[in-house]
Amino acid sequence: MEKEKIKIKEIIVVEGRDDVTAVKRVVDAQIVQLNGFSGLTVKSIEKLKALSERNDLILLTDPDYAGKKIRAVIEKNIPNIKHAFVSRKNATKKDNIGVENASDDAIREALSHILVSGASDKNKDPIFTVEDLVENGLCIGKGSKEKRLMLGDMLNIGYYNSKQLLNALNSFNITRSEFEEAMKIIKEKYCKCKEIQLYV
């Protein structure tokens, strides 16, 4: 039986035509297509800014380098834009990484965890520091990249290198308890993976 489409009042901003098709399978909402990074012109940004004055926007880009660049440029121009993330593992088919590869359930999951950046609040003290990343093996040592990938998926914030991760944790108002709970699960999973490898 086909699941009912989710009604979303916000306008969803995606990168390309195939992303529109994938999201429309799941969602009843207005969707705006950017045409990738090359489609990110002064004119298209001005159009998005005008749209954002009358509507809330949700940004759903591909979980790759270009998707991150697009997200950064748009957020700089529209600081109150909402964010949704499809995990890299759910958006990858062979060598292709994109929202269009995500299953209906993965898209539903992404759109059920909307984040708003708090980056515009410059007076707020950051919750997380480099020490948090070091103590939890997220920026140095073996397995730090894998742990960051797992953390990004669990907190629905996408994948980042260590410097970007610190900014994302503070920008998206992740709480200390959410972070600690996720790290506890990651450490358990990671230790189990290491044990399995030792016995293989």
Image: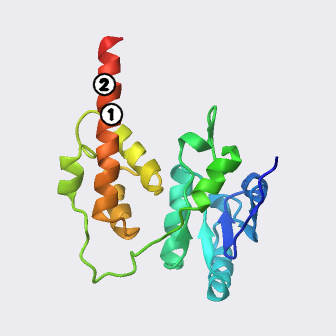
Residue 96 placed where, x, y %?
64, 39
Q: Looking at the image, which is closer to me, 57 or 9?
A: 9
Up the image or down, 119 lies above or below 140; here it is below
Q: CA distance from mark 1 to mark 2?
A: 6 Å
Q: Looking at the image, which is closer to me, 130 or 176?
A: 176
Furthest residue to the top?
Answer: 200
Quick check: 119 left or right of 135?
A: right
Tell me, yes or no, if residue 61 can be seen here. no
Structural crowding at the residue carrying mark 2, measured as other residues with C-alpha within 10 Å and reported as few (<14), some (14–19) or many (≥20): few
Task: Name the mark on residue 190.
Answer: 1
Residue 127 placed where, x, y %?
25, 68
Up the image or down, 140 lies above or below 173; here it is above
Residue 44 placed where, x, y %?
68, 74
Residue, disc 2: 194
Residue 73 placed where, x, y %?
52, 69
Furthest residue to the bottom?
Answer: 54
Quick check: 101 left or right of 21?
A: left
- Please give the name of the residue rendered at 35% of the width and 82% of the height, measured from the top-left corner: 121
Up the image or down, 92 lies above or below 23; here it is above
- Please give the name of the residue rendered at 61% of the width and 70% of the height, measured from the top-left corner: 58
- Please give the name of the residue rendered at 43% of the width and 55% of the height, measured from the top-left corner: 155
User: Helix or strand or loop: what does disc 2 sit on?
Assistant: helix
Quick check: 179 left or right of 73?
A: left
- Residue 11 falls in which quadrant of the image? bottom right
User: Helix or strand or loop: what does disc 1 sit on?
Assistant: helix
Colour theme: rainbow
Q: What amino acid type should be assigned to the residue bearing mark 1?
A: Tyr
Q: Give the quarter of the figure containing the C terminus.
A: top left
Q: Looking at the image, which is closer to me, 178 or 11?
A: 178
Structural crowding at the residue carrying mark 1, measured as other residues with C-alpha within 10 Å and reported as few (<14), some (14–19) or many (≥20): some
Q: Does the residue at mark 1 contact the one at mark 2 (Cβ under 8 Å)?
A: yes
Q: What amino acid type should be assigned to the residue bearing mark 2?
A: Lys
